[in-house]
Image (cartoon, rainbow, N blue to C red):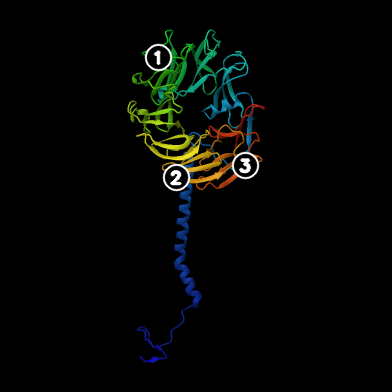
Amino acid sequence: MTLRGGLRDVVRHDDDGTPPQAPVGGSRGTAAARLRRWWPVALGVVAVLAVTQATLATRGRSHLSRIQVLPGVARTTDASVTEKWRRDVPGSIELALSATVVDGRWVGAAVAADGTQTIQATDPDTGVTAWSTVLAGPEPAEAGTQLPKPTCELDRPTGAVSGFPTLVCLVLAGYQTPGGVTAPARPEPSSARIVVVDRSTGAITAERAAAPSSVLAVDGDVAYIAEVTPDGFGLVTATDPRTGQARWTFTTPQPLQSTTGRQPLARLSALDGHVLVGSEQGPAWLLSSTGSVESKVTDVAGATLIAPRVGVVALQTWSGSSSPRLRVLTSNPDSTTGSGVGPNDGPTIEGDVVTPTVDDGSAPGLIFTGGSHLTAWDAATGEERWSASGSSAVGNIVLLGGRLYQPTPIGLRALDATSGAFRWQKRILIPAGASHLPTVVSDGRAVFMLEAAAIRRLVAFDPMDGSRMWASVVPEDTTDLAVVGDRIVAVQRSYFHGDAVSALG
């Protein structure tokens, strides 16, 4: 080998000294050969991507389907949303917002201007009344007095033997204003009935008399009725909702207390196998679903049972303080078994409980309270987990995918539900003169709020980063939003023009 000009000849072992031959077909042949070798791989990659995309899309639709069956979640809503129908008769808002969804219809009780008490079912797609049943009335009321509407609840049978759900109503009538009392008089009923209503047709299938002092609570397939005996004790009877047959009774060990100059009023609540009976003052008694006493509650004023989270049952009392006290009774998802935290050893939490209007079960074991701060508490220990500055105004929270969505005085914000970490905040014009913050609603894909710009608009925000997805015009007198069944409802409250509701879709 000789060196020439810094270069050197290199003899390849496969070099036989003949000039190299050009490949058959030239460079085009080489490219074609390579293409033939790689096109199956390319097709395979495309196929994998297509399958992956289809799988993710299927999972996304499945996840959305699971979210949209949760209470408080609206059906899929997009920018084409419009007003489908409007109802502006007196009591429209209360009728809609308190309705129970039965067989796809909105079923609720109402009191007409002449005092007639009804229960009625509304078709959410058209606003047409599917059926209406008169329960009592007409009954004139004194000027400035609004008679209470019937208490109607849906029993939920746990076995096939019990049949289909039935509406059970407590109807009070014959209101009179008692004289000779030092405190401001309140109308008191002179008669009461338990009325069983067919959920499909509105037909009355059974009714029976009850004491005028009765109150009603339904839990599962049991109707609990509490009344005040002639000697002032509280009497609770657990009954079969349809027949009225008594399963057990409980009489309070001491008379119920009341405010000066008034007859005592029984207070009753039943939730997830727990029953609470008492009055507006004095002690209350916490019972099991079998009627046995679990505990006597002495630090009470207006005690009641509430569900601050899915799978959590708690006793709320006031104890003379400015904010309520919450004692956790059950803090596991399987609360119907009676397991979990016992009635005497559960943690106590101070503050106004904020129950998520949508709760997908993420951030389990946390209870939220509001006020000047939004605070998360450990339901098992009562310890504070985190606290975020907020507003004393009343608002709601939506819990989806481990995030809390909350209205603020300047708009909408998202927080990590487990840590309280700030995720994003977006400004939005709040309706002027509102006594509470606008309600946040969701369809599982977006979160919505009402914007009071030059025109009222329903604004959709991306849950991940808060970006505006779209905005759609709603009735110009809309003051808030709500979800009834699976439909977003525009609420219109007006001192001058009366109340109304509009179904959007």
Q: Nearer the viewer, residue 318 or 452?
A: 318
The location of residue 447, given as percent across then percent down, is 53, 41
Between disc 2 and disc 1, whose residue precedes? 1
User: In the image, which is nearer the foreground, mark 2 or mark 3?
Assistant: 2
- Looking at the picture, which amino acid does disc 2 mark? Ala
* CA distance separating discs 2 and 3: 31 Å
Q: Secondary structure at mark 2?
A: loop
Q: Give the quarter of the image for residue 128.
A: top right
210 relative to 501 in the view: left or right: left
Q: Are marks 2 and 1 in contact (CB under 8 Å)?
A: no
Between disc 2 and disc 3, whose residue precedes? 2
Between disc 3 and disc 1, whose residue precedes? 1
Q: Give the quarter of the image for residue 363.
A: top left
Q: Secondary structure at mark 3?
A: strand
Q: Which residue is mark 3?
A: 472
Q: Nearer the viewer, residue 109 or 391?
A: 391
Question: Does residue 352 appear in this view?
Answer: yes
The relative height of residue 232 versus residue 362 in the rendered view (above or below) is: above
Q: Nearer the viewer, residue 499 or 317?
A: 317
Q: Which mark is residue 246?
A: 1
Question: Which quarter of the rendering shows the N terminus?
Answer: bottom left
